[in-house]
């Protein structure tokens, strides 16, 4: 199918290599071939494109870095807007900054950290786009005290499904603001975000605390969360050399001149022999995960990710059951298991979190062999079953992953918030052209 978007010929790309690249994502499981890819030179190109798509009822999706795993940023026979060309970063003033949505968090940090500022929450891997993670939620090591990234946005510029450029915030078009934050691209394309910034010290003291015992791991996770003294905190579960699982806490404190390890680690149950500490500059610390992932490579492998938010009060039993059923081999050569504690301030947005003040993101991220025909169906079944178990105890889905949901599941997922989102969809994307890959409406 040939797409015609009047006035946009210069920035419309239709070569085979570009279309194929946009027909896949980090999961390598779903492949939907677009008819064209737009590389906008300016925001007005996004406005024109969405106006045309709305008029022609042509499906369209923004693509940040394509790091979702189940086709969320893909569109069959439609238009993909490659947001990476819109990556301007404005001046940093009065503890805030404006950034175009195609910039990555790594680009943002490279500008803010040398000036002593940081967004309050940065994702663990920083090669993700600002617009992509704000459309999902955005969880990082600081979420245990500052919530998801969507809680730390001051304003957005959004192009709606009808091609209207709008500014929104908690006081200006609040219904659009809250629908778009965590809204999986359903109501408009974010072209710019105004982010709150927080001061950050130049050095990072990065502790890794090891555990053989789940009870001690969870006790320390809770102690550090409640004590609220460190700047970053998350957990990891690893296959143990003795069989079963071992546990790791990642803990960071930013500092200027001195940092007291003994005060930071006082009263924790991790064995002193299972602790390591690194001293890094803050910018180097922020890309530790990036370097590990990029060194691992293996980006050609299929990946099925299970990602659920759990009520903090239910985490120990849920994780124990999930790990009892998980074989280490299921993680494959590039898999991992992570736990991010999150403060839930219940701010209005489309990201659905369990109804407790402390919740936890639990990710089982598997990888498989492209030659194994059973890998994807087996793991999709497991993802669905873990989601259903989480849902039964008040958990919710983090839609970055692979779990297949029906439109009825989405209605249940949004619960009492569904009607407001349905109304926002009808109002801001009446032709229902935006982001069909997530299959929400
Ligand atoms: C290696 C890796 C590490 C990760 N680490 C973390 C982590 O630490 N914390 C975390 O929370 N998540 C993490 N994720 C998940 C990640 O947040 C999501 O997959 C996110 O969507 C990726 O951003 P992206 O720029 O690649 O978005 P894409 O995958 O390109 O897009 C995601 C969705 O958002 C929509 N979208 C993209 N840009 C816009 C826009 N400007 N306006 C409106 N809609 C838009 C797309 O259409 C799509 O539906 C990780 C993923 C990977 C692969």
Image (cartoon, helix red, strand yellow):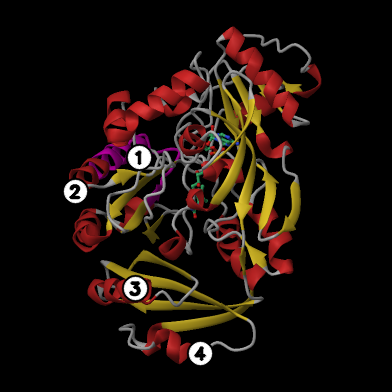
Whole-angstrom CA distance, mark 3 to mark 2, is: 23 Å
Q: Marks 1 and 3, Cα distance to the nearest angstrom?
A: 39 Å
| Most foreground residue, 44 or 265 | 44
Q: Position of residue 261 (x, y in %)?
A: 48, 88
* Marks 4/1: CA–CA distance: 47 Å
173 and 375: which is toward the camera: 173
Measuring from the top left, give residue 137's x and y in whole percent: 46, 46
Local SS, label 3: helix
Q: Which numbered disc flags the more N-terminal residue, 4 or 1? A: 4
Answer left or right for 144 relative to 75.
Answer: left
Q: Image check: 144 left or right of 134?
A: left
Residue bearing the label numbered 2: 393
338 vs 59: above or below: below
CA–CA distance in space, label 1 to label 2: 28 Å
**Mark earlier in primary sequence (1, 2):** 1
Which of disc 4 and disc 3 is earlier in sequence? 3
Q: Nearer the viewer, mark 4 or mark 1?
A: 4
Question: In which quarter of the view is residue 405 placed?
Answer: top left
Residue 79 placement (x, y as % from top left)? 61, 20
- For mark 3, what is the residue? 226
Residue 23 forms part of the magenta stretch? no
Mark 3 or mark 2: which comes first in sequence? Answer: 3
Q: Residue at x 38, y 60 (%)?
A: 343
Q: Is residue 110 visible?
A: yes
Judging by the rendered image, the residue that carries numbered circle 4 is 260
Q: Which residues are magenta?
A: 364-386
Instruction: From the image, state whether disc 3 or disc 2 is nearer to you.
Output: 3
Q: Which residue is mark 1?
A: 375
Q: What residue is shown at x 47% (from left), y 26% (from top)?
A: 437
């Amino acid at each position: 199918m040939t797409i015609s978007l009047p006035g946009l010929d210069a920035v419309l790309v239709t070569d085979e290599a570009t279309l194929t690249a946009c027909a896949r994502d980090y999961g390598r499981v779903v492949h939907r071939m677009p008819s064209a890819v737009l590389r906008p030179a300016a925001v007005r190109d996004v406005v024109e494109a969405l106006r045309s798509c709305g008029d022609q009822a042509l499906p369209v999706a923004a693509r940040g870095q394509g790091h979702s795993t189940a086709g969320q940023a893909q569109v069959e026979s439609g238009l993909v807007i490659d947001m990476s060309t819109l990556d301007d970063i404005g001046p940093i003033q009065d503890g805030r900054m404006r950034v175009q949505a195609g910039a990555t968090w790594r680009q943002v940090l490279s500008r803010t950290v040398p000036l002593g500022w940081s967004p309050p929450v940065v994702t663990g891997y920083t090669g993700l786009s600002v617009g992509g993670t704000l459309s999902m939620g955005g969880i990082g090591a600081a979420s245990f005290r500052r919530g998801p990234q969507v809680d730390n946005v001051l304003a957005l510029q959004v192009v709606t499904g009808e091609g209207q450029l709008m500014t929104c915030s908690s006081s200006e078009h609040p219904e659009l603001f809250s629908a778009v934050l965590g809204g999986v691209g359903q109501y408009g394309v974010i072209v710019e975000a105004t982010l709150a910034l927080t001061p950050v010290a130049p050095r990072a003291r990065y502790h890794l605390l090891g555990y053989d015992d789940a009870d001690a791991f969870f006790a320390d996770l809770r102690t550090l969360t409640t004590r609220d003294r460190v700047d970053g905190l998350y957990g990891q579960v690893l296959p143990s050399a003795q069989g079963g699982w071992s546990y790791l806490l990642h803990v960071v404190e930013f500092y200027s001149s001195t940092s007291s390890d003994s005060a930071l680690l006082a009263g924790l149950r991790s064995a002193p022999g299972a602790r390591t500490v690194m001293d890094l500059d803050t910018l180097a610390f922020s890309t530790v995960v990036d370097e590990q992932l990029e060194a691992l490579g293996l980006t050609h492998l299929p990946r099925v990710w299970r990602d659920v938010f759990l009520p903090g009060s239910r985490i120990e039993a849920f994780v124990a059951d999930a790990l009892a059923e998980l074989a280490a081999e299921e993680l494959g050569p590039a898999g991992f298991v992570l736990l991010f504690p999150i403060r839930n301030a219940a701010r209005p947005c489309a990201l659905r979190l369990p109804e407790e003040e402390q919740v936890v993101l639990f990710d089982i991220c598997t990888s498989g062999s492209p030659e194994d025909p059973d890998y994807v169906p087996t793991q999709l079944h497991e993802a669905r079953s873990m989601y259903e178990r989480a849902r039964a105890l008040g958990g919710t889905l983090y839609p970055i992953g692979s779990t297949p949901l029906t439109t009825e599941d989405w209605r249940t997922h949004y619960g009492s918030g569904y009607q407001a989102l349905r109304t926002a969809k009808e109002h801001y994307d009446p032709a229902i052209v935006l982001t069909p890959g997530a299959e929400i409406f």
